[in-house]
Amino acid sequence: MGGLEQVPRRTGKEVTWHLSRYSSRMPAEKHSYWRKVALVVSVSVTVGLLLYLLRGMLAPVLLAFLLAYLFDPLADWLERHSWPRPLAVSLCLLVLVVLTVGVIALVIPTIYHEIGALARKAPQYVARVQSALVPWIEKNLGWQLSGQSLGEVLSSTANKLSASAEQLAGPLARIVQQLLSSIAGLLSALIVLVLIPLFTYFFLVDYDRIVNWFVELVPPARRPLFLERAREIDEVFSGFLRGQGTVCAILAVIYSVALTLAGVPAGVTIGVITGLFNFVPYVGTTTGILLSCLFLLLEGSSWSAFLVVGIIFAAVNLVDGLFITPRVLGKRLGLAPVAVILALMAFGEIFGFVGVLMAVPVTAIGKVLGKHALAAYRQSRLYNAADGEGGHGDG
């Protein structure tokens, strides 16, 4: 009939046998796979819920474990050179304390002084903008604010800034005073300051045992694959955290010294900001150039100063690309800047400061597992079924 073959009718036993035969073709591994997926999803949701509920108390613990992760290679190196593990860990903590105190003693007062100087110069900056920029804006754009010209508004702002220059010179001091006025906040800060080094010490002493404990939770048959994936995650995570962190610190020092010697206002502050923002390529350099040019413009500097700033950023970027980053990072693969930014925003919004600490490790795990999941999908029957069906259709 119309080229269609007539299908013979089956008896009840034949239909039952046919269905059971069809069902047997469905591999048992498929059901096992979905059970594993459900288990992983359930565990992930449970862990995420616990992290959200305990995010307040987990912050010092996660920060301490992150510090232990950073200093574990140094502790291992000292241990290989006949240092007892507790003594090696104590030396690592001493290095951490010295670095922290050194940064606080050298950088923070300079930044505080530069912010105060900028605050005291704020009225001059407003007056310079008023005399140079406002006439052009009013003439060409005709902007008016609440019945006043833009020049009058800025003049009023300059007078207010002049009256409160001393208060603006000490914003950090007011913040410190507010923190110290809260006994609960002070006690909480002291507890955290004590707990973080304490947790870091114990995590570093038992770091290998902690890692081995997690490894032993994995079934022996799956352990080689787990260790292989863990090494890949460690390579990505350490490459970003240790490598990029080292590069950022080096660039912060270079930019701070170079901009200060070039006479850029708030040179140390701009240098530190540029170095820190260098975690995201081009963002640090762009931010540093914009801030430097802004303050040079407000200072009324000559065009030669702008030229010097351009040369500084071009030279440092050249040195970074040719020597610093290749020497520090080598061929290790890092994380995509967009992925890091999105992870920081998402985890910070959900978990707060704990989420910020979790963002980069979770992104590293997601990158490695996602890469292998995509490779497995491309080799699966589901991915290749379309080609097979297309081939039958063509025939």
Image (spheres, grey):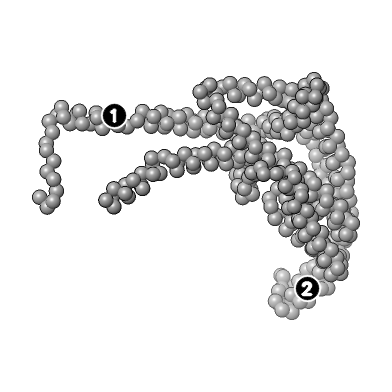
With 28 as the anchor, is 71 left or right in this view?
Answer: right
Q: Is residue 268 above or below residue 308?
A: above
Q: Nearer the viewer, residue 212 or 172?
A: 212
| Nearer-N-terminus badge (2/1) | 1
Q: Mark 2 and 1 residues: CB-CB less than 8 Å, in contact?
A: no
Total marks shown come to: 2
Q: Is residue 291 above or below residue 388?
A: below
With 328 as the anchor, is 181 left or right in this view?
Answer: right
Mark 2: which amino acid?
Answer: Val
Percent of width and height locating residue 96: 81, 33
Quadrant assignment, res 138: bottom right
Q: Is residue 218 above or below residue 335?
A: above
- Local packing at callout 2 (Cα closer than 10 Å; few below 14, some 14-19, many 20+) is some
Percent of width and height locating residue 334: 65, 44
Percent of width and height locating residue 95: 83, 32
Question: Residue visible at 10% across and 50% down?
Answer: 1
Quadrant assignment, res 124: bottom right
With 395 as the anchor, is 184 left or right in this view?
Answer: right
Question: Residue visible at 80% across and 39% down?
Answer: 179
Quadrant assignment, res 361: top right
Can residue 8 be seen by looking at this rendering? yes
The residue where tag 1 is placed is: 24
The residue where tag 2 is placed is: 134
Task: Spot the residue most to the bottom.
Answer: 139
Q: Nearer the viewer, residue 58 or 371?
A: 371
